Structures are given as C-alpha cells and as structure tokens.
Amino acid sequence: MYRRISVFTFLSFLLFANFLFSQDTQELEAERAISTKIKGEHPLINLMKTKTSTLKEELKGVHPRVFLTASEIEDLKDKTKEHKELWATALSRVRAMTIEPAPAPAQARRVQNPVGLGIPEAALAYKITGEKKYLQAAKKYMEAALSYKIWGYAYNKPDVDLAAGHLLYGLGWGYDLLYHDLTPEERKKYKAKLIRQARLLYDFYKPQPGKTYAYSQNHTFIPMSGLAVTAYALADETPEAKKWAELPRAIFEGVLATYSSDGFYYEGIEYWIFSTPWLIHYMDAQLHATGEDLYQKIPGINLIHKYISHATLPGAEFHFDYGDTYTGNQTRFKKAEDYNRERINGHFQSSYNILYNIANKFNNKEAQGVANWLKQKGQVSAEEMWTFIWYNKNIIPTPIEEQETWHYFKDHDVVFWRSSWEDDATAFSFKCGPSEGHSVLEKQKQFPEWRLSSGHAHPDAASFIIWADGKYLTGDSGYEGLTMTQSHNTLLFDGKGQNHEGEGHDVFYGIPYERINKIKITDVTMNAKKVTILADATAAYEPEVGVKNFTRKFEFTAPDTFTITDNVETNNQQIITSYLHADTTINKLSENMFEIEPNKTSLIAKILEPKMFDAKIDKNVLTAPGDPGSVDKGGLQERGKKLGISTKEKVTKTKFVTKLVIKKEM
C-alpha cells in the first residue's frame, strides 16, 4: 500500500535534501579533513551515555519544571511586590501583547525568532498574574509556531538552524509552563509539533562516523539549547526525549570547553548579544532540571562583564565594532536597518541582563555593577522576564566608576583603554591575535571533532579603533559579507590583505591554526598616562604574499597622542599601504598631514615616515552581508572614507611612523 504525501511535504523533502547536498563547500571540506582525526567510535556517543541528562526525581511527572516549578513561581509573585519597577518593565515587554506574530510561512530574516521568545514571556506573565489576556496572547504565539511548516528558512538549513532553536525553546517552555492551563486537545497538538521538530533537529545533529561540530559557533549551541528545553519539557511523555536531552549535553561538553577563556567574544559584540543568552539558557535548564551545575566548567563566562564593559563605547549607545558588528558608520548615523532593529523605543537592546545572572552565580560584584551601569544608561534586554528573575538585590555591586578603565584580554590579544567611564571619555582599542584565541591549539587536542567556524571574525591583525567626545574618530567598518583587510587600520602588500580574504565569509578557513596562533601581542604596558603595545602580525598574511616581518608598536600618551610605528620586511619588492578610516571626512592639510573627522573634535594624522609616500583618500566600499546561506554575496556599500599611505615605489623593507593627535576645539 502506498502512502499519499502532500505536495508541500514532498517539496520540503526536496528542499532539505538540496540543503544536505549543497552545504557550504568549505564546511564539507573541513568535515572531511577533521573526520580523519576521529578514530573509532564517535566521542559524542560515550558522552551521551555518561553525562547527566535525567530529570531530578522530584520533577518527574511535574509541570512546570524546566526553569521554574510552581512553588518557585509563587516566590516570584512575592518578588513582584519588592521589585515593582523590574516587574513593570517585564510586563511592558511581553511582545505577544503588542506585536502580531509573522504570518506563515514567515520567511523574512529572523521573523520566527521573536515568536519563540514571546511564548514564555506571555506564559510566565499569566502564571504570575493570573490574567487571562496573557494566556490568550501566549496561545496566539503558540498557534503561530504551529503554523510554520518549516522552522527557519526553506532555502537554507530548514528546521535545523537558529529559528528551530528559538521555537523549540519557546514552545517547549510554554508547553511546560501552561501544561495545566491547556486543554487535552491543545496539549496533544503542541506536543506533536514539538516531537516532529525535535526529531528533525536530533537526526541532523546526532553523531555519525566522521561528523564534526562547530562547538564555538552560535549555529550549533542555539539549536541545541532549544532541543534541551523541549527534551526536559517532554521527558516523561515520549521515550525519544531521553536521547534529545543526551545529545545537547554531549555537545555542550565541547561548547563550554571551547568558549572564550578570557571573556572576549570572537564573533563581535552583535553576536555576543544574540548568542550568549543561549549558553545561559542551556546551563540554567540543565541545572534546574537535572541538578548539574555547568557554570564551573566555563571559567570565561565569569569574565564576560569585562568584555561587555570595555567593548561598550563611552555613552553606552555604540560599541567597538570588531568582527561582524552592525554596519559601521551607517549604524552610528542611525541610517541602517539594524539601528532600529536593535532598539526598542530608542533604547539599545544589549542582553546586559545576563550579567545579573553571572553576578548571582559567582557572587560577582563587578558584573552586578556593570549591569547596573548599562541599565542606568537606558539599555534593555531581549527577554526582560529574565532580568526580573535573575536580579538579586543581595549582590552588592562594585560601581562602574570603581572598576578598571583598561583591560588586556590575553587569550585573544585585544587591549581596551579609556580615560574614564564618563560619556565624554577618550577610548581606544588595539587587536592583534588569533581568530578564536591562543587556547584553541590545546582545546583542539581535547576535541578532535571540533570544526572551527570563524566566519564572523575579521582579517584585522594589528588594527585599532579610536573614539573621543562621543565620536568615532577612526577604526573598523562593521559587518561585512566578504571581509577584507582594507576595511581596517592595518597594512596591505601589493593590495593583498590578511588570511584568505576575498575567498568567502570565513577568511580563516583552511589555515593551520599553528600559524594563526603566531598572530600575537608580544608585550603590553598600561596605566592611566601611558600605553605601549608591541604586536607581531606577520603570520596573518599568507606565505605567498611574501611578508617576512610586520611588527607594530602602538603607543598612547594621555590625554591625546598616539604614535604607530611599523617595521616591515618582505621577500620581494612590493607597494606597502597603511590605512586609516573615517566615518565621514578626511581632509589633506599638507603633504604629510591629514585631518580625520573635522568638526569640533578631530584626529590629526601626521606621517613621519616614510619621507616619500603616496597618499590617496578614497571611498570605503565593501561587500555588505547577504541573505542567510549567501552571506558573502551582498551588494556593495559605501561606509565612510579611507586614507591609504603607500610607499612611493616597490620596496623590500620600510618603516611607517604615524602620529595621531586628538584635536579639540575649545
């Protein structure tokens, strides 16, 4: 007997099959290369058998249970009386009350994600207040999740990527929270959808001979976090839930171990904001549902407040935009789509509330202080219900004014410095390190199945960013589809930049990490008056480029003077170019002097060496990011201006000395 299948089901199968056969070529090649290192049984199989993934006895047969029990919800009711402001903010941000869910098929970028986040917001609001309007809102979003035949994009990783993670988290936790408030028919249909989607995700990620995992990449741990929430929500309702819980636990062994050792996030602040909550959601669900505390397995998580505070520019509206972070001057001019997308009623959405959780878990007073500072600056979070849940008044904060105004992230070799925590402070950063940190080499030995996926990191060794008086004076260009060295303040050799630039979104793909690891800061001295950084960026360039030596000395003397000294040698004669960038304007003042961003506060650049050079002021044109699955195929976009200082003729040895002075009109 033949089973009749719908046209939609058949087309969905073809789309999924096409995805399987048309995965990014680099990813498939990386999988083949790494799979040869995996001997015998896949490492995840043993982890699935041995790591904790079983509900605590007292939670079996109980709902709710994943993140909160009924008694804990009763405690939150009392908390609403004590923290009225936090609770009022949480209620005001229940998106299901004010925003209609995207109608099916919901194929625009990221439109399914808010549905996943919105379900538990409304569900928890109902459980705490008892008001039926929140229950109705939660069900409206749950029905929307059911209406999406494909969770995610039909054209790119259908049912197994970010949207699937968001919706499994939201519908799974919503089902758990509202279990006793749903009719038997409602429970049946929501459960059936969760089972279908969990099966698809599990089947895609389950260990197979030679299978590799991009542990440090958000496209791995976001779906796995969602799968875990659904697994614990359905733990004693379907036998399959056991393996659904086992797989994320096994994968998170690698995810947590490969997370940043020093707190710096290699994908950039935009992706930290988007991604890091999912690490927290998984660890919180694992702790609450099974009793296993994974926070101690990820020491870098207790340092993220350092990253957030120092990566935040004075004024707390923008950030040092290393990696794929927003759209450069377009964001700062409030013209880009991402400016409004990342703001709610004008307030920047930063996921700062994670720091309240870290403060609570580690009694981290500095983290509490950073979170308070960002809250006072008007920042908001994507899930304000968690702000209310995580905040612990008993953690006495270290005020931001009492925290250090400079920090060196040694594993990633990134330095941040600012004159104060005031809005008008001068701040700068210098970066010269391997894409995912020096500790990767040892971690790769521990996890041979780990496939690096560094596409959101940039070819920016020895680059720097300078900000003063609420103004971006020089630095990076933001999120690029095709990341290029010329978008940063560093060097090109005969027009060629670092790593495999121009060959795809991941410019680090295929480069032995032993060589990437040689990109480094060799010495740092810092205090309130003087900063000196020595860096070696030689290994950032492919051997065929012929860079024999590129070392940079970056010096700052308070309050306003920088000196950048580059010593360069090549194997063959080349034109060597040093770049400086501006958001709007670069003016030539004399043969060796230029003014960047003239208007009250500016940056004066004086070229001291070489004595003979060519200077060119040009538009800073780059490839913007394209659609998911085609990130490197966006259109060209102009983002400010760039000044190229080049040797007058081809040379094998040269020295660049540039003096930068912040000029302020009195």
Image (spheres, rainbow, N blue to C red):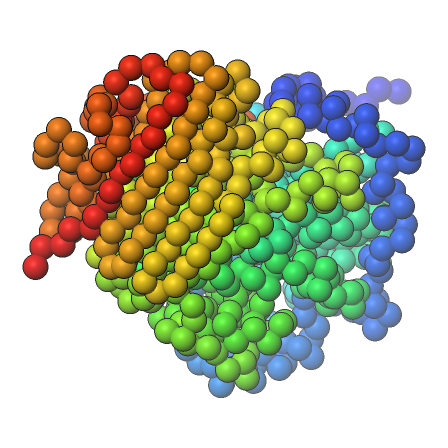
Q: Quadrant of the N terminus?
A: top right
Give the total number of marks visible in the rendering. 0
Residue 508, visible in the rendered structure = yes
Is residue 86 rendered to the left or right of residue 217?
left
Identify the image quadrant of residue 475: top left
Q: At 22% across and 27% down in the image, what residue appears?
A: 611
- The picture places residue 569, in percent across and down from the top left corner, at 43, 24
Residue 664 x %, y %: 13, 54
State left or right for residue 192 relative to residue 493: right
Question: On the picture, is 235 further left or further right than 171?
Answer: right
Q: Examine the rendering and report whether any part of residue 619 can be seen.
A: no
Q: Residue furthest left?
A: 666
Image quadrant in which you'd find residue 463: top left
**Along the line of sight, the residue nearer the viewer: 76 or 519:** 519
Residue occupying image coordinates x 69% and y 25%: 30
**Camera-nearest residue between 446 and 549:** 549
Q: Is residue 51 above or below residue 322?
A: below
Residue 619 percent across, percent down from the top left: 24, 26
Report the residue at 40% width, 75% height from top: 402
Is the C terminus in the top left, top right, bottom left or bottom right quadrant? bottom left
Where 50 falls versus 608 (above or below)?
Answer: below
Looking at the image, residue 340 sits to the left or right of residue 167; the answer is left
User: In the image shown, does 649 or 64 lie closer to the viewer?
Assistant: 649
At x 61%, y 31%, the residue is 515
Q: Compare residues 519 and 341 and report the one nearer the observer.
A: 519
Q: Position of residue 372 (x, y in %)?
A: 42, 72
Q: Is residue 638 above or below residue 456?
A: above
